[in-house]
Image: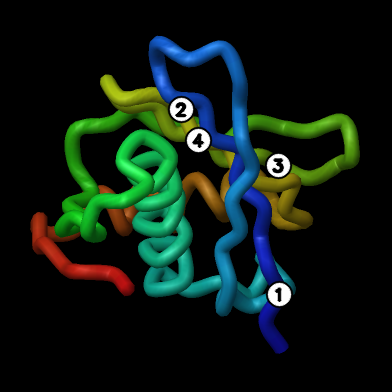
């Protein structure tokens, strides 16, 4: 079963944040694989790009050149935050162990750089 995930996006130079949706990830974050995490990060970056360039074509996604952190949320879950020169994107809360999700993201980020087009 999959669910939609809300991503809050803020583009530098603007005064507001917007919410985008990611579809197709498993509903239970504690079952995510590295592929699921790669999809989450890629879709978060694409949401940020769509907010900045709403009429542009989706760019090639390379999981390099941004900062990220997994932080606890008051709900008992965790939130994933990404920061780029363009702005920030935050998704969650996810009901998954902070250390487990951090480890999955580290594995994805340490994998050899490959570009992919995400549609």
Between discs 4 and 1, the one toward the N terminus = 1
Q: CA distance from mark 3 to mark 2?
A: 17 Å
Kindly identify the residue that appears in the image at 50 percent across and 35 percent down: 89
Kindly identify the residue that appears in the image at 61 percent across and 58 percent down: 21
Question: Which element carries disc 4, helix, strand or loop?
Answer: strand
Label 4 crowding class (10 Å Cα cut-off): few <14, some 14-19, many 20+?
many
Residues tagged 2 and 4 counted as in contact (Cβ below 8 A)? yes
Label ID, residue 88 = 2
Q: Provide residue 90's location: percent of width, then percent of height.
A: 57, 37
Between discs 3 and 2, the one toward the N terminus = 3
Answer left or right for 79 relative to 13.
right
Which residue is more in the foreground, 95 or 13?
13
Label ID, residue 107 = none
Question: Which element carries disc 2, helix, strand or loop?
Answer: strand
Which residue is more in the foreground, 33 or 91?
91
Q: CA distance from mark 4 to mark 1?
A: 19 Å
Label ID, residue 3 = 1
Which residue is more in the foreground, 80 or 13?
13
Q: Disc count in the image?
A: 4
Q: Provide residue 78's location: percent of width, then percent of height.
A: 70, 42
Label 3 crowding class (10 Å Cα cut-off): few <14, some 14-19, many 20+?
many
Return the residue at label 4: 89
Q: Is residue 53 placed above or below 118 in the rendered structure?
A: above
Q: Provide residue 50's location: percent of width, then percent of height.
A: 38, 47
Q: CA distance from mark 4 to mark 3?
A: 14 Å
Label ID, residue 78 = 3
Answer left or right for 2 relative to 115.
right
């Amino acid at each position: 079963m999959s669910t939609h995930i809300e991503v809050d996006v803020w583009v530098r130079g603007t005064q507001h944040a917007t919410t985008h949706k990611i579809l197709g990830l498993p509903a239970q974050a504690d079952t995510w694989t590295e592929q699921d995490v790669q999809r989450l990060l890629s879709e978060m970056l694409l949401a940020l790009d769509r907010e900045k360039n709403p009429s542009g074509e989706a760019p090639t996604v390379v999981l390099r050149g941004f900062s990220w952190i997994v932080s606890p949320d008051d709900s008992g879950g965790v939130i994933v935050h990404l920061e780029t020169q363009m702005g920030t994107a935050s998704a969650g809360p996810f009901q998954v162990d902070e250390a487990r999700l951090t480890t999955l993201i580290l594995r994805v980020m340490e994998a050899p750089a490959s570009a992919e087009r995400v549609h």
